[in-house]
Amino acid sequence: MRLDSEEELEYKLRGKTLQVYLHLIKSGTNESYGVREIQRALGFKSPSIASYHLEKLRELGLLTKDDKGDYRIAKEVNVGLLKLYIKIGGFRLPRFLLYACFITSMVFTYLLVYPQTLSLHNLFALMVSFSSLTILWLETLLILRETRLRPIKKEVKNEST
């Protein structure tokens, strides 16, 4: 059974490997990170765990390794939780955040422009609006909480001879 390349990538990019990739994406695509930095940031018990997953990502063509042994993002793909994000400028924002902001502005516009008479039509519109707002903002917060990661602290390397 031959998998499509995107399906195959999504199959291989899961668990701790996906966690490492997500962390690198959120930490900055122009930065390079060492094995120990990733290990400490993600709370792995040993550097070999971080090294294994970094090498796996490198073999998938998602990372490159420089002469110092540091890793850098080579290619960004939208798989797993990354499908729930959209990239605007240099920022990755949850898609639901954009929808939530749009609906919030529409509800406030409705409240300001349309006279609030507490008619059946008005009450129904308010009920639908506020339930939509609640769902969108909760989903946004859940996605942010699920993908919350600690920042990677760069090690200062002493090159004394």
Image (tube, grey):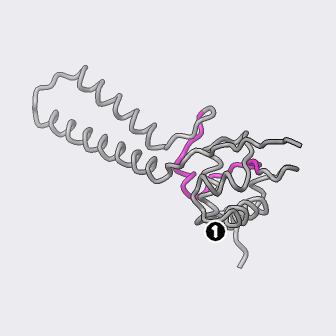
Report x, y in % for residue 149: 53, 49
In the depicted view, which residue is nearer to us: 10 or 16? 16
As displayed, is residue 121 above or below residue 84?
Answer: above
Residue at 60% from the left image edge and 62% from the top image edge: 44
Which x, y percent locates residue 26?
Answer: 60, 45
Q: Is residue 120 left or right of residue 26?
A: left
Assign the N terminus to one quadrant of the image.
bottom right
Q: How far across and down, in percent of the image, does residue 4 sit? A: 70, 67
In this rendered view, identify the residue nearer to me: 144 or 5. 144
Residue 40 in percent (x, y) is at 61, 54
Relative to 21, is 116 above or below?
above
- For label 1, the SS is helix
Q: Amino acid at mark 1?
A: Tyr
Q: Is residue 44 above or below residue 155?
A: below
Please state the extent of the stretch shown in magenta in the rendering: 71-88
Q: Nearer the viewer, residue 12 or 45?
A: 45
The image quadrant that residue 11 belongs to is bottom right
Quadrant showing the C terminus: top right
Question: What count of labels does the image hold?
Answer: 1
Question: Which residue is painted at 78% across and 50% down in the image?
Answer: 70
**Residue farthest front in this picture:** 161
Q: Judge from the rendering whether residue 139 lies leftward or rightward of residue 121; answer left or right.
A: right
Label 1: which residue?
Answer: 11
